[in-house]
Image (cartoon, grey):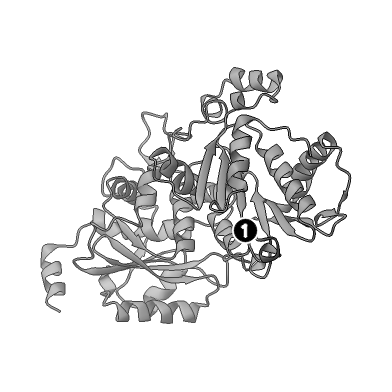
Amino acid sequence: MEQKVNIKQRLAYNYLRDDVTKFLCYGGAGGGGKSWLGCEWLMQCAHFLPGTRWFAGRNNLKDSRESIAVTFVKVAQWHHFTDYKLTNDGILFDNGSEIIFLDLTYYPVKDPMYERLGSKEYTGGWIEEAGQVHFLAIEVLKTRIGRHLNDVYNIPGKILITCNPKKNWLYREFYKPWKEGKLKAPYAFIQALVDDNPYATEDYKESLRSTKDKITKERLLFGNWEYDNDPTTLCDYDAMCDLFANEHVKPSGLSSGSADLAMKGRDRFIGGHWIGNVCYIRIDQGYSTGKSIETDLKNMMIQHSIPRSLMIVDSDGLGSYLESYLNGIKEFHGGVRPVNPEFDNLKSECAFKLAELINNRQLRIICSEAQRERIIEEIGVLKQDHIDADTRKKGIISKEKMKEILGYSPDYLDMLIMAMFFRIKPIPQKAKTKLQTM
C-alpha cells in the first residue's frame, strides 16, 4: 500500500510497529491527520494479518459508524483498496479480518463498569475523539487486546488513542507526564498540529486561524492543553486530580458522615465517612429502598463511630423520612440562609468551601478508580453562577443545569458539598470535648 503520511504520522507508525509501546496517544490539535492515521493503520493491520479482529470506537455507536466509515472509505480509495465491505457492525475484509465499531458511551446506571466490553477479544484497536470517552472504557479495553491471534502473528496488542486537547484523563495520563519528561513505556504521546500535516487544506487552516473563539483557537490551532475553557469553574483540574493522592492530609479528629440519598435507581445512594478532611466512600448503590437506605446508613454510622449529630443527609423527603428513624441526624437544607451573607444560600456557601479546600489541597478522598473518574467529572461542573454580575451574591449553577451538562445526577458532588456544613459551622468546643471522651 502506498502511504500518505506526514512526519508525525511516520513517528506514530514507529510506535505502532515496535514491541514496546502498547498505548499511543496521537493528536492534541485539529487537522493533524488523526482520523486518517487511525483508519490507515487498522486497514493495514487487518489486510496483512488475515483473520484478526480490531475495534474502532467513539463516544457513541452512531459516530463510530458514520464518521469512521466515511474516513475509511476515503483512505481505501487513496490506496485503491477494495477487499472489504461495510456492515452494520463495522468493516469486514475478504481475508476474514474485521474492524468492529464500538459504542463507548458511559451508562452510569445500566452499565457503570463497561461489562458489555468484558467478554470481547481483540487483536488491537483505535479510540477516536477520546476526549469524549470515559476513562473506564480504555481501562476495560486494555484487558481485551492481545487476545485474538496475537500469539500466531507474534505481535503485541496495541491501542491507538486520537484526540484534541481535553483536561481529563488524557491530560493526566498522557500529556502532563509527556510534557514533564516522565511518560514511560508502554505509553507514548505525539503532539500533532495542523501545520505538521501537509495534506490539511488551506481552507481548513484558515478557518482555525480566523475563529474568534479564543478557546477554540488555543485548543485546535495551537494545541494548548493548559487552556482555561470556563472561568466559572470553581476547582482547578490538577487540584481535582490531587484529591486522591493528598497523602499529607491525615485522618485525624472526629468521625462525621454525609450522604446523598436516592431510591430505586432514580439516582445513586452515596455515603461518605469522614475522619477530619479524609473522606472514605463507604456506600455507593444504584438501587436502594427506603428500608435498605436506613439500614445501610445506620450500619455505616455504627461501624465507623459516626455520632448522629455529625451525620448529615439531604432533605428532599428521604431525609425527613430518615430523621424520624435515626433521631438526631441532621438534614441539609441547601436553600436556607447562609452563615456568610456573601453567598446566596447555604448550599452555595458549602460549595465554595469545598472548592477552597480542594484548590488548597486540604482534602483527600479514598475510593475506587471508577469512583475517582466520576467524582472528577462531577466536581468539574461545580461552576459559579452570574459570574459577571457584580451586584449579585455568590452562587452556583443549579442542580438541573449540572444534570444537563453531565447527563446524570451529581450525587458524589452533593455528598461532598453537604459535608462542608460541619466546616462552615464548626462544632462548639464544649460539644467537641464531650464527643472526644465518649
Where is residue 326? Give x, y as percent: 35, 78
In this view, the residue in front, 188 or 224, is: 188
Relative placement, left or right, of 42 versus 158 is right
Identify the amino acid type marked 1. Gly
Name the image quarter holding residue 395. Answer: top left
In this view, the residue in front, 148 or 437, is: 148
Q: How many marks?
A: 1
Relative placement, left or right, of 92 versus 204 is right
Q: Secondary structure at mark 1?
A: loop
Where is residue 105? Give x, y as percent: 64, 55
- Pointer 1: what residue? 157
Image quarter of the C terminus = bottom left
In this view, the residue in front, 240 or 414, is: 240
Label 1 crowd bin: few (<14), some (14–19), many (20+), radius 10 Å? many
User: Is residue 352 at all visible to an observer of this figure?
Assistant: yes
Q: Residue at x 79, y 51 (%)?
A: 47
In this view, the residue in front, 312 or 3, is: 3
Where is residue 323? Give x, y as percent: 37, 74
Relative placement, left or right, of 246 versus 400 is left
Q: Residue at x 68, y 43 (%)?
A: 38
